[in-house]
Image (cartoon, grey):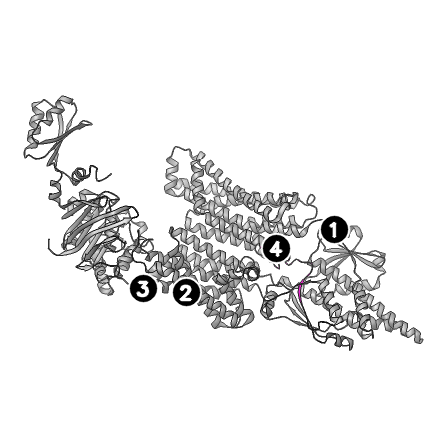
Amino acid sequence: MTVFNAFLKVIKKNLGTIILYTVIVVFFAAINSRTDDSSTQFVGEKPDVMIVNLDKGTELSGNFEKYLTDNTNKTEISGGDEAVSDALFYREISCVITIPKGYEKTVLEGKTPEIEIKSAGTQNSAFVKNIVSSYIRTQNAFASSGENKAEIIKSVNSALSQKASVAITSKLNTGALTKLANYYIFSSYGLMSCILFIICIVLTSFSETTIRKRTIISSMSYKKFSANLLLSCFTYALAVWILFVVLAYFMMGSIVFTMRGAAFMLNSFIFILTALSLSFMLSTFVPEKNAITGIVNVLTLGSSFLCGVFVPAAILPSWVLSIAKVLPSYWYVDSCNKLAEVENLRSNFMPIVINMGILIGFGIVFAVLGIIVSGKKRKIE
Amino acid sequence: MSDKKVIEVKNLVKEYKELRAVDDISFDVYEKEIFGLLGPNGSGKSTTINSILSLLKYSSGNISIFGKEMTPDAYDIKRDIGVIFQDVAVFQELTVYENIDYFCGLYIRDKKQRKQCIEDAIELVSIGDYKKFYPKQLSGGLLRRLNIACGIAHKPKLIFLDEPTVAVDPQSRNSILEGIKKLRDDGATIVYTTHYMEEVEQICDRIIIIDKGKIIASGTRENLKKLAKIEERITVEIKKMDKEKLEGFKKLEKVTDVSYEGHTLVVSFSGGKNNIANMIDHLRNNNFSYRRVYSERPTLNDVFLELTGKELRD
Amino acid sequence: MFKHNYIYSLRLMLRNKQLVFWTMAFPLIMAMLFNMALSNVESSEKTEPVRIAVVNDDNFKNNQIYKEAFNELSKGDDRVFDIKYTDADNAKKLLSDEEITGYIAFKNFKPEITINRNGIKETIMTYVVNEITCQSNVMIKLAFNKLSDEISNGNYNNIQKIFEEQSQKAFNGEDGIKTVTPKNMSFVMIEYYSLIAMSCMYSGLFTLTLMNYLMANISAVGKRSTVSSARKSGMIFGSFGAAFTIQLFGLLLLYLLLIFGIRADFGSNVPYVILISLLGSAAGLSLGTAIAVLVKKSENAKFTVLIAVVMAGCFLSGMMGITMKNVIDKNAPVLNKINPEAMITDGLYSIYYYNSNERFIVDAVSLVIFSAVMLLISLRGLRRQRYDSI
């Protein structure tokens, strides 16, 4: 109990840090769950587009605009030119389509109107370009064969409405699942930081020579002391984990407790165990409190960048991912991604189990290294 | 000792909410004397010093140093003051030499002059062998010596030392006390606060005893000891004793107090010149088997005990 | 007093390992990490061929238009599709194994698409197939019109030619699109700007440490400094000057790494970049001073507070998710107005993207105001020479 109390005191002292990281994770998750199409994901069925119709009122331009609206996600950007430029830069919209003045007149004369597309140069904007191109060419074809306005509209719409039937095999609610996966992925940064930081500080405090000497000569057996300490650390990690899971529930609802959600939970639970083990190893390797903050930050930020937490794994260069395999976060993130996409969980669970196994392996390796080093240190005294 | 007053403190009061840490203290310090403030922990010594130095806001009172009113921006006064605080005030990232150089440099601009001052300071506290060491590498005693060097390198005329020998080994302590005496001999006025009476007895010319923010006694060593109401105390190691025999001692001349504990008999005398001879006679006459006998003069602890009913080192 | 304190402040800072790490080494490490992670972000924005399968049964084999169309679409370096022609069962398997985005089967000459989920690749696939359908319909309709004209005039010779003409019109017409891609669209740069901002703000650690040394109620050496005859203003300026010097040096190293090592782009307006860096550093230094004076706890606590504030600012200005800054601009712009890191990041962004004056000036002035406010807050604490308790 005494050990636990001392532990609690350290936590109290560093409560600010814990709150900070938690807040960051919550904030990020909240933002993510509101925006349906976050451009960091580069996933969206309809590209976001801003449409400027300078020929408003004419039927042909109206039809064109309607077609665009049906096939893209029409977005209004208020705030003038600068806001539009910002939106393009941040990939909030993939392009701005401007229907020129005199559009209808030009078309009816049998000529091709000039459509200006301000593009962000992305895959999405290339796609939009194709949509526009298709419409204009179709329209041209009919306009140049002498049809009148009403006929043109009818023909173009008819031609463009011939769509192939599409069957989606997935029964997954991918939108919600992706959000859940993103939450868990990003929370790895928060979890890792909270656990690494606090546990390292506690363990280094307890292993400071002065305190360690006191502990060793005290009446509590060293084994009992270590066991107590370990239990306290584990309780703390568990508490943090529960906190993050509860937050997930508040933000995303019951999906957190479905079968798949449970798999996410299991994955993150194993992750915190690995993090605990890592903290233990770090505290034996680096006995100074001051150095710990620096190292923990480099580790958490580094892992988060290289393993696909801040930057989606799909975008990371393959050589970076190979390096990232050395870090436990990589395997955690990989499992999260698989869980979000894999259609049939039951038949495809093996790779995820392997990943979890690797995580546990990491944990064991860290623990063993830590024990070896701390054993050596005790003798050097 | 000169007649010139270096410090004049009049009716100094410092209150913290309901508590009066310094309760109407007045005293003067004369040039070239070693002035001692003696008192137990929490009596208000450091508060008094910090107030004099204009570090602390005080509730009321007048303080003048070198005849001028002391304020936070009295830079001309500050130039001639050196302070050694209770907590070691040195930079961990600078060597011994660099530390002294830095602090001396806050007072003395001229590089050549400063260099000489630093060498003198190092010699005074005898840390010449450690010039390039970092504070981390020094023992407690050496650290205190460095602390002192930093405070006096600029050759101030008035030096405050606030409990400079706490947790210091005897060798360093001695060297420190000797150093202080030398400083005084070189012309400085010293104000020395401590709760160790042996030090005060060793070096201070005049002493005030403070308790709970008030001065309860002041004067020279000898004057103060007279307040103790005992002149001499004789201690004898005696194995066997009983009540009757104990009473016998009380009948001796000038005996004020008799006590026996743990095979040790302690008899206090308020005066008399042949007390030891009388004691030994008495012991022989009554067939006591005794071993060691020794006599002590009263200490300031006795004075304090007399005045307050408690020990200095409570 | 200035020179003496300046030199010693430099020594104190450079010998403090923890300080040097956070302010100099950490940003460089982060820069390299960013580079590793982000090197692919923009190249991955370019189009990659979509992998699909086509069920190669008689329905498809007899469909001339689609056969030719698919052939065209899977040729060349900028092809749209990578196509596997196979049977129905294999196609299903490929899809469930996630080897392809989707497969197409033909029924009655109409294509049927099966995909796993809705995503950009799936959308492209669906779209292209629809496009072929559409264009072939167009061609047929146009040809039909033309043919019925010819036939009513008695011309039977030009059927082939008519089909070809209309096909040409339908498939290869002009679209009149003018694409404009603004310059400097690399939004990965935001990460690097955010890093510069972080480095500027971490300079607060210098002033934090140095101010602690000057305050009597915080450190023992502070007591010494206060009772000495040295003018406080001289000491403060000396410390500030030293902190500023080291900060600029560290920032320079970071810029060198970013510009020459990582090839980050800061636009073409060098004087502005220098200006915002100077102002940003000043903001960081003054933040450190304010924390030193305001936070009444231990030295370690102040350190943690500063790091926490800086990291939070980093997060809000886009370091951990580039779009964060934009999201805040839209939903809680006041945050960006008081976050100095957002000001610095935005300033650099406006130089890079807009090359404009107005926005940059707003950022620069905001930084000046921020520094002034921080310094005013600190002034009271710094000036104080007598304390209520020590």
Q: Which one is in front, C41 or A152?
A: A152
**Dot 1, how many residues are within 10 Å of its Cα: few (below 14), some (14-19), or many (20+)?**
some
User: Which mark lies nearer to you, 1 or 2?
Assistant: 2
Q: Which residue is mark 3?
A: C233
> Label 1 lies in what chain?
A
The circle on residue C124 is none
Q: Which one is in front, B133 or C297?
A: C297
> Per the image, is B165 magenta?
no
Residue A60 image point, x, y percent:
76, 71
Q: In the picture provided, is B84 more to the left or to the right than B207?
A: right
Residue A273 image point, x, y percent:
54, 43
In space, the residues marked 1 and 3 are separated at their CA atoms by 74 Å
Q: Are marks 1 and 3 on the same chain?
A: no
Quarter of the image where one finds residue B169: top left
Quarter of the image where one finds residue B311: top left
In space, the residues marked 3 and 4 are separated at their CA atoms by 51 Å
Amino acid bearing label 1 = Thr
The circle on residue A169 is 1
